[in-house]
């Protein structure tokens, strides 16, 4: 699963919000599909720019992510790098495009159900749920050091 961090949580929520508010969505378009909409937020580029970059590789985002080479500076690899830099793995990219990570689906409000990759409302629900999971993981990993007992006793002695 993705590396939980607040940047990733934020861009997932921003993307879900944009889609929920009517941003252009077309699953068959590299620039306007699930990952395309996410990249618009992450890289601050237009769907047209993403489409141009994506066409320097072959296949859908899932295949592009599988072929990703971090040392290549091809435009499509730079787009994938934007996603991996915020904590996603190629497997996460696949799951985001197909809405099929069972650990996310199990946490959906109301319980597990299959979602459809080309239904805007399902994408919003998946991205929002994924953000919630990552935020919870992030918060659970924060450790707040407690002062030594003698400091507590001194501070609260009365």
Image (tube, rainbow, N blue to C red):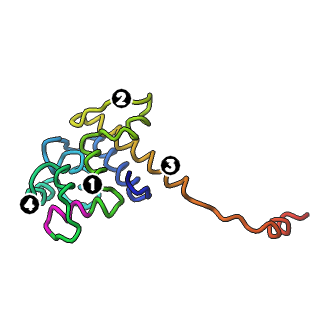
* Residue under numbered circle 4: 56
Which of pointers 2 and 4 lies earlier in the amino acid sequence?
4
Left-right relation of 62 to 129: left
Quadrant where the image shows the C terminus = bottom right
* Residue at x 25% of width, y 40% of height: 98
The stretch drawn in magenta includes residue 54: no
Mark 1 → mark 2, Cα distance in angstroms: 23 Å
Element under label 4?
loop
Magenta-highlighted residues: 74-81
The part of the image, by quadrant, that contains residue 5 is bottom left
Which of pointers 3 and 4 lies earlier in the amino acid sequence?
4
Mark 2 → mark 4, Cα distance in angstroms: 35 Å
Residue 120 in percent (x, y) is at: 25, 36
Position of 38 relative to 145 (above/below): above
Left-right relation of 152 to 47: right
The disc placed on residue 90 is: 1
* Residue under numbered circle 2: 113
Which of pointers 1 and 4 lies earlier in the amino acid sequence?
4
The part of the image, by quadrant, that contains residue 145 is bottom right
């Amino acid at each position: 699963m993705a590396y939980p961090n607040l940047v990733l949580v934020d861009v997932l929520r921003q993307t879900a919000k944009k889609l929920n508010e009517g941003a252009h969505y077309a699953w068959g378009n590299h620039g306007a599909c699930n990952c395309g909409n996410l990249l618009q937020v992450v890289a601050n580029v237009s769907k047209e720019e993403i489409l141009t970059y994506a066409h320097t590789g072959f296949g859908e985002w899932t295949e592009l992510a599988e072929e990703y080479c971090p040392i290549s500076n091809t435009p499509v690899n730079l787009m994938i790098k934007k996603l991996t830099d915020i904590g996603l793995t190629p497997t996460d990219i696949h799951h985001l495009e197909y809405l099929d990570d069972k650990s996310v689906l199990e946490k959906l409000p109301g319980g597990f159900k299959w979602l459809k990759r080309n239904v805007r409302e399902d994408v919003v629900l998946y991205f929002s749920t994924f953000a919630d999971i990552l935020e919870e993981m992030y918060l659970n990993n924060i450790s707040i050091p407690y002062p030594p007992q003698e400091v507590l006793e001194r501070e609260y002695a009365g």
